[in-house]
Image (cartoon, rainbow, N blue to C red):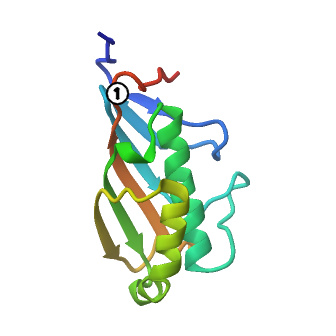
């Protein structure tokens, strides 16, 4: 039987931009709380190309953090998507759905889409956060 950390452990993949004042994720037992991810690339720039490309980058960042702790998309139990332009997201829903299936397969956890007036980076159109529960047999120790 694995021993789970008693205190929350930060999860910060080396392939993502180094966090400052936050963690990309926090592991508590088998539960991974995935911090809000915008479409930042490794150079700390929001990717160009509109909502579909920003969705691809933001969701990829979420999945990178999930994988760092041993998780897979099927472990996601909840996703919250913050949007600065809900109609734009809806207009590109089919394309975004294709990107989701490409990255995560046909797995759809509990989800919410919330409109907001602004995100931390002015160019960001989307921010995605989530929660995953990773089974013991895949849970990877994080440092």
Q: How many marks?
A: 1
Q: Residue at x 32, y 74 (%)?
A: 114
Name of the residue lying farthest toward the left: 110
Residue to which mark 1 is pinned: 8
Query: Would residue 139 be found to the left or right of residue 39 on screen?
Result: left
Residue 61 position, x and y percent, is: 56, 52
Residue 19: percent from the left, percent from the top? 57, 43
Q: Nearer the viewer, residue 55 or 116?
A: 55
Asked whether the viewer can see residue 104, the reply is yes
Residue 84 location, quadrant: bottom left
Identify whether 50 is placed above or below 139.
below
In the rendered image, residue 134, in percent from the top left (x then y), is placed at 35, 33
Q: Nearer the viewer, residue 96 or 114?
A: 96
Q: Residues within 10 Å of mark 1 (few under 14, many from 20)?
A: some
Compared to residue 122, the image places residue 120 above or below, namely: above
State the image quarter where residue 113 is shown.
bottom left
Q: Position of residue 128 (x, y in %)?
A: 43, 61
Residue at image point 32% right, 11% down: 3
In terms of secondary structure, where does tag 1 sit? Answer: loop
Does 36 sit above or below residue 111?
above
């Amino acid at each position: 039987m694995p021993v789970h950390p008693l205190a929350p452990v930060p999860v910060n993949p080396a392939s993502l931009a180094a966090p400052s004042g936050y963690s990309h994720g926090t592991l508590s037992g088998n539960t991974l709380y995935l911090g809000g991810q915008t479409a930042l690339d490794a150079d700390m720039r929001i990717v160009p190309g509109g909502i579909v490309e920003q969705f691809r980058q933001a969701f990829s960042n979420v999945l990178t953090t999930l994988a760092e702790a041993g998780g897979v998309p099927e472990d996601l139990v909840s996703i919250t998507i913050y949007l600065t332009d809900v109609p734009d997201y809806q207009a590109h829903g089919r394309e975004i759905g294709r990107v989701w299936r490409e990255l995560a397969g046909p797995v759809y956890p509990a989800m919410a889409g919330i409109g907001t007036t602004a995100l931390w980076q002015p160019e960001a159109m989307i921010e995605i956060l989530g929660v995953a529960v990773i089974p013991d047999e895949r849970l990877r120790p994080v440092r």
